[in-house]
Image (cartoon, rainbow, N blue to C red):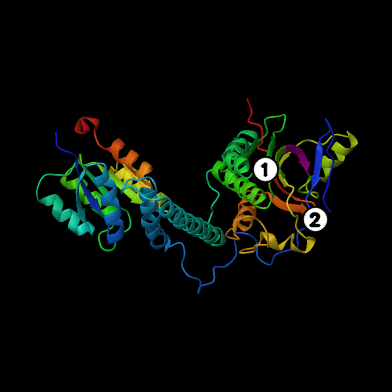
Amino acid sequence: MSAPNILLVDDEPSVLRYTKTLLEIENYNVETAGSGEEALQRMTRGPAPNLIILDMVMPGMDGLQTLENCKKLHPEQKVVMISCVNDTNRVVQAIKLGASDYVTKPFLSQQFQGAIRKALNPAVLN
Amino acid sequence: MHSSLCTGNEIVEVTPPERRKRQLRCGHEEVDPSAFPLVSAAHEFKTPLVVMLGYTDLLLNGHLGAINQRQKQVLAEIQEGAQRLQKLIQDLLLLQELKAGRDIVQNLESTSVDESVSEIFNYWSPTATQKRIRYQFNPSEGNERVRVEPLKLQHIVSNLIENALKHTPAQGLVTVSVTPCFWERRKAQSEFLFNMERKESRKVENAVRIDVSDTGRGIAAEHHDEIFEDFIQLPGGSARGTGLGLAIARRLVEAHGGVIWVESEVGKGSKFSLLLSQAKQEAN
């Protein structure tokens, strides 16, 4: 069975590289998108990823708007949000919009991997 | 002047010392319009920290290949610097929220003081052990409860314990105590009741005092008020802090309707105390 596919969405290139490193250590297949718009374009072509990891704060289409639009395309899409600790209200909104979980910055490997494993369906991992 | 009775079974009566009046009340100070908008920049501050802390953690844990001892030491220094920066940013953001006068105390819960303080006491236990500081917790004998945001109460006590451990040398002693007491807050309004109580020679415990004492170098009297202001750090101590811990503690205590103060003399250690009203008993 092939490794889960994860779409990573963040406007900050260094964070994209770091988070991609974290995911590839666990042997996930990782695609990246530098904006909400780019993520949405990716979602309209090709199969949906097993999981989207989505930064809350981005210029243009922000995390919540991207989440909402992705869910319209694929209602069952699993999404983990990355937020700042001050984003309480937005995190609550994200959960209401269907996000599976959230991780707050700055996050370390163990915390992050735990959230990813929890979000991914165990059936996929097996 | 601070006075307290502290004997066996007698109710402790506490009168916190007069603090010099600040011109502006806590939580209602105007935000300087020229101040950098820290709250809105939270995202920008924390994003680089994700990378700094994240990569050093990966490297130190060997996820990106083996490293030698010297590299490990260097990475540990970088990690410590990034963690200090993280703490400073968190404190600055919280302080800015407190200063902005937002209603930062919202989700009040009836909270067991002993349990809450015990949790934070245990959190700092490894630090005390590592620094070879004797470390004691004296809970109250009752189950006093206060209406607070539990995490904020722990934040306050954590700041006090952290400071005590920072300023106490090895073989010294840090003690955390919880004591129920009588706090006369509204003299005029409750004069009738107090007269009745005095007549009956009985005062009702209506507050809880949390004390964090240390056997560090002590603080001169002229600094007793200013140490609760922003960015004040007194010389000494084993590690530099942000200078915001006590300022934040004061604002959080006052946001809960409490008071905080210090008793200390140079060479004789310090005792930081905070008073909070007890939660009213729920009717059964």
Image coordinates for residue B185, horizontal then vertical, percent:
76, 48
Residue B262 vs residue A63, the one in the foreground: B262
Instruction: Kindly identify which chain the residue marked by label 2 belongs to.
Output: B
**Image quadrant where residue A3 sits:** top left
Q: Which portion, as a residue range, is magenta?
A: B179-183
Figure label count: 2
Q: Residues within 10 Å of mark 1 (few under 14, many from 20)?
A: many
Tell me which secondary structure the magenta stretch mostly adopts: strand
Q: Secondary structure at mark 1?
A: loop
| Up/down of B169 relative to A115, above or below | below
Which of the numbered marks, if any, corresponds to residue B265? 2
What is the C-alpha distance between the residues marked 2 and 1?
Answer: 20 Å
- Magenta residue check for A90: no
Image coordinates for residue B49, horizontal then vertical, percent:
40, 57
Q: Secondary structure at mark 2?
A: loop
Instruction: Kindly identify which chain the residue marked by label 1 belongs to.
Output: B
Q: Residues within 10 Å of mark 2 (few under 14, many from 20)?
A: some
Q: Is residue A35 left or right of residue B13?
A: left
Q: Is residue B73 left or right of residue B25?
A: left
Give the mark toward the camera: 2 or 1: 1
Among all residues in the image, which is located at the extreme top? Answer: B284
- Magenta residue check for B180: yes
Quadrant holding the C terminus of chain B:
top right
User: Label 1, on which residue?
Assistant: B133
Q: Is residue B26 left or right of residue B17?
A: left
Quadrant holding the N terminus of chain B:
bottom right
| Up/down of A44 relative to B209, above or below | below
